[in-house]
């Protein structure tokens, strides 16, 4: 089953793309213009939630969460206090829009890299209020289970054995909101592993957030050129070395000698 939404191609053509065109100036670094001409929904220190200037989807309200003041930093390298503050800000705003009852559902995700579907290099996430669609209709419990990498009270970090799109997908499943900061740390480890150890060629990933069956879930997905098996035939490829990947991550990040 799919949800079909009209896409405003004329608006999309006018969007800047600092990932593909080095001559385009970064709209998220220019905070003076953001405050002068943009719609700022929420702010906390360096974090901004703003209205997306390019509303490309019909029957939706698109927002951008700007994570940093400059293009120099990325989620994989934030120190823990900054990472925790970012997740506090993001979750607070996401849950506010979810509970507003203005939307049937609110999707929350992050693009990074040329194969992620993004266009701006500057670290950011996106929230989209959907007036008519509920993303949860397309979710299944097995998509968020897998080989456990690490687990602490209230949150589990696993490698998916039934990925939604194929190949490598990590899940961080939060069952206790008090463990949000640990969730953020697990997400950062997954991103760091993909960029540093697994995806050096493409350096692209997505993070998709879900509210599902009482849990908050982050799915971290390695991105590379799309699989023709999936696009043409809905065949999902699952790596046969998942256990080796789990052991590698445990050795790199959870052993006594581990360090980022």
Image: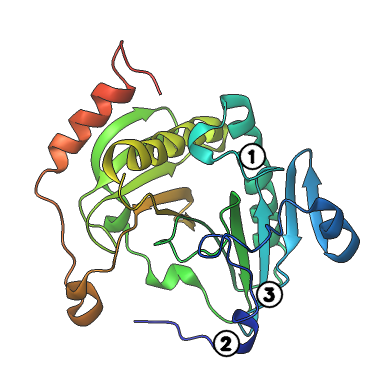
Q: Position of residue 233 (x, y in %)?
A: 17, 80
On the rendered structure, is 234 left or right of 2?
left
Viewer-nearest residue: 201 or 48: 201
Q: Residue furthest front?
A: 23
Estimate the spatial distance between the alpha carbons at disc 3 and disc 2, rounded to whole Å. 11 Å
Instruction: Say if 223 sits above or below 193 in the image.
Output: below
Say which element carries label 3: loop
Q: Position of residue 247 (x, y in %)?
A: 19, 29
Quadrant in the picture for the N terminus: bottom left
Whether residues under marks 2 and 1 lie with C-beta atoms below 8 angstroms apart, the answer is no
Crowding at dot 2, Cα within 10 Å, few <14 / some 14-19 / many 20+, comes out as: few
Q: Residue 198 or 55: which is nearer the viewer? A: 198
Q: Residue furthest left?
A: 240
Upstream in sequence: badge 1 or badge 3: 3
Of marks 2 and 1, which one's residue comes earlier in the chain?
2
The label number, if any, that marks residue 54 in the structure image: 3
Residue 15 lies in what quarter of the image? bottom right
Q: Which residue is mark 1?
A: 86
Q: CA distance from mark 1 to mark 3?
A: 24 Å
Which residue shows up at 60% across the image and 60% down it? Answer: 126
Task: Please give the residue where the numbered disc 2 appears in the rendered image.
Answer: 9
Residue displayed at 39% across by 53% down: 204
Q: Is residue 145 left or right of residue 210?
A: left
Q: Residue at horizontal 44%, vertical 82%?
A: 3
Q: x%, y% of residue 19?
A: 52, 60
Q: Quadrant of the C terminus?
A: top left
Residue 55 placement (x, y as % from top left): 67, 77
Q: Is residue 129 above or below residue 73?
A: below
């Amino acid at each position: 089953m799919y949800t079909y939404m009209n896409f405003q191609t004329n608006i999309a053509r006018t969007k800047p793309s600092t990932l593909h065109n080095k001559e385009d100036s970064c709209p998220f670094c220019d905070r003076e213009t953001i405050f002068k001409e943009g719609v700022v929904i929420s702010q906390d220190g360096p974090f901004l939630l703003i209205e997306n200037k390019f509303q490309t989807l019909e029957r939706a309200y698109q927002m951008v969460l700007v994570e940093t003041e400059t293009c120099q930093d990325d989620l994989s390298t934030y120190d823990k206090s900054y990472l925790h503050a970012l997740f506090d800000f993001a979750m607070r705003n996401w849950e506010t829009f979810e509970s507003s009852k203005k939307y049937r559902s609110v999707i929350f995700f992050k693009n990074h890299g040329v194969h992620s579907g993004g266009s701006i290099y500057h670290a950011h996430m996106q929230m989209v209020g959907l007036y008519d669609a509920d993303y949860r209709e397309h979710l299944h419990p097995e998509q968020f289970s897998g080989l456990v990498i690490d687990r602490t009270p209230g949150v589990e970090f696993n490698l998916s054995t039934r990925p939604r799109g194929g190949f490598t997908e990590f899940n961080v499943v939060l069952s206790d909101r008090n463990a949000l900061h640990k969730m953020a740390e697990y997400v950062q480890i997954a991103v760091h592993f993909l960029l540093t150890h697994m995806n050096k060629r493409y350096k692209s990933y997505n993070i998709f957030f879900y509210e599902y069956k009482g849990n908050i879930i982050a799915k971290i997905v390695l991105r590379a050129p799309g699989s023709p098996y999936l696009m043409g035939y809905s065949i999902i490829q699952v790596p046969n070395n998942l256990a080796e990947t789990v052991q590698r991550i445990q050795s790199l990040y959870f052993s006594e000698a581990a360090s980022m």
